[in-house]
Amino acid sequence: MADRLSPLDVSFLYLEEPSTPMHVGSVMVFADTAEGVEYERLCELITERIAGVPRYRQKIRWVPGRLASPVWVDDPSFDVSYHVRRSALPKPGSDAQLRELVARVQSRHLDRSRPLWEMYVVEGLSDNRFAIISKTHHAMVDGLAAVDIGQLILDATPNPRTTPADRWQPEPEPSSLDLVGDAVLDYVRRPTAVVDVARATANDLRSLPGKAAHTLLGLADMARTAVRLAPDSPLNVDIREQRRFGSAITELDDYKRIRKQHGGTVNDAVLATVTGALRQFLLTRGEQVDPRSEIRAMVPVSVQGGGSTAGNHVSSFYVDLPVGESNPVVRLHQVSYAMRAHKESGQSVAADTLVAIGGFAPPTLHALGARVASGLSRRLFNTVITNVPGPQFPLYAAGALMLQAYPVVPLAKGQAVSIGLTSYNGGVDYGLLADRDSMPDVDLLAGLIEESLAELVETVR
């Protein structure tokens, strides 16, 4: 039986345009070991461990005539050295030079004739550091259990864990005739596919907390949001192909102190911090900001589901960030109230249900922003803010300590910047991907995030 892509995953291939590559990425910064970074050793780690994620040795084959969704097939020419590449900055490479390299790497589309991922080992970074840039196409991300290629090389100790010997042999690649034959067989075997989708959707609606009535209220609420246009914002423009990348480093304890003093959650403190940064950003640009000004963010949040998939649901909340409010504590309370109202109303809808209904939401947190129908993004929200909690203990790659982990969330059509953040080992690292032409000041916005957090911290006794 062919390993066929799901309709959702195929949609990311169709939605991909020159200005909107559909891959998610990461930037990991490491302290170099005394022996120095070994590109060959990192390639060996990938080769040893890639058996745990066989999708990363597979490529996409389209069915002739598009009779059915494309299929995953083993790549008989798989070459790890093609996917894991070596790069270097002129010593001593600065963080600004690294960000410029990240922007250029993330601007380029992945080669669809090969497995849809790449990794760059970047040497020459100042203070005896190196970086690893990864990018993976959304078509390869299948659920919260999906493993990013960058995770394969990480260990909880400086000594890499051992892995079983890999005796992988690629399956023969199907011919065009085989692909057509399999597509016809699928239709013969599953003539009720449409009915199955409808039945699965109905089951999902019944299984969500609050039962079907609350779920339908959630859909109605989203419909009202679509009618009520997102506020006009300089964050919504016609974007082009090239990118910029900004980063900010903050401390998790600061958000915890804010939560303890003022209530709410750590995520509320994060959103209030971003709200303050966006407010100052707009003022710096000379934009009109009055007490009623708002920026609508789509915020993917993990919610508890029922049954065996508990915890594997992601809801997308549309939160109007009060950028017109000058008081940081009042901003925090307004954000907390909005998030609490979303959660308590039962009007959030699990991502897998939305997928079955209309292809709205993705199954992973950082991927959620890019998995929204591209044509609706500008209408529904101004930007995406994804917050993914990571491990609060050190991780290593080939013995090198990971210092920072910045997410790279791709841009939706018509959106100038996306904001992702990951907490790791006591820190909270922000990655901002932006359109190169409309956001030459993305570094300013990144710096304002740190200033906005400091403003909130000052309110803590």
Image (spheres, helix red, strand yellow):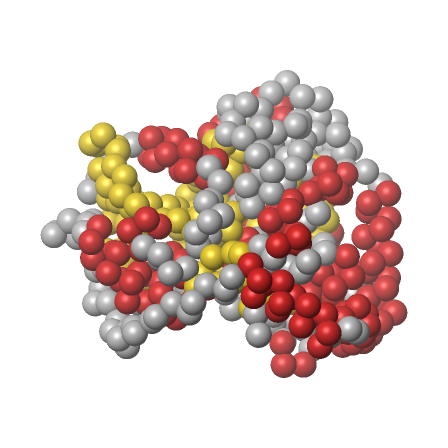
**Front-lying residue, 80 or 283:** 80
Residue 235 showing in the rendered view: yes
Give the percent coordinates (x, y) of residue 277. 57, 35
Please state the horizontal and vertical placement of residue 91, each as a whole percent of the image.
20, 31
Q: Position of residue 185 (x, y in %)?
A: 67, 72
Q: State the residue at coordinates (30%, 45%).
A: 85
Residue 332: in sight, yes or no?
no
Residue found 35% across the figure and 56% down from its top:
77
Q: Residue at x 65, y 37 (%)?
A: 413
Residue 130, by quadrant, is top left
**Which of the two residues, 310 or 282, is positioned nearer the viewer here?**
310
Q: In the image as oriented, which residue stretches furthest toward the bottom?
A: 308
Q: Which quarter of the rendering shows the N terminus?
A: bottom right
* 288 relative to 78, above or below: above
Residue 438 placement: quadrant: top right
Position in image of residue 15 (x %, y %): 65, 44
Q: Classify residue 273 as left or right of residue 228.
A: left
Q: Which residue occupies the foreground of this view, 310 or 345?
A: 310
Query: Relative to 21, is 205 on the left or the right?
Result: right
Q: Residue furthest top?
A: 286
Name of the residue lying farthest toward the front: 177
Between residue 425 and residue 45, name the one nearer to us. 45
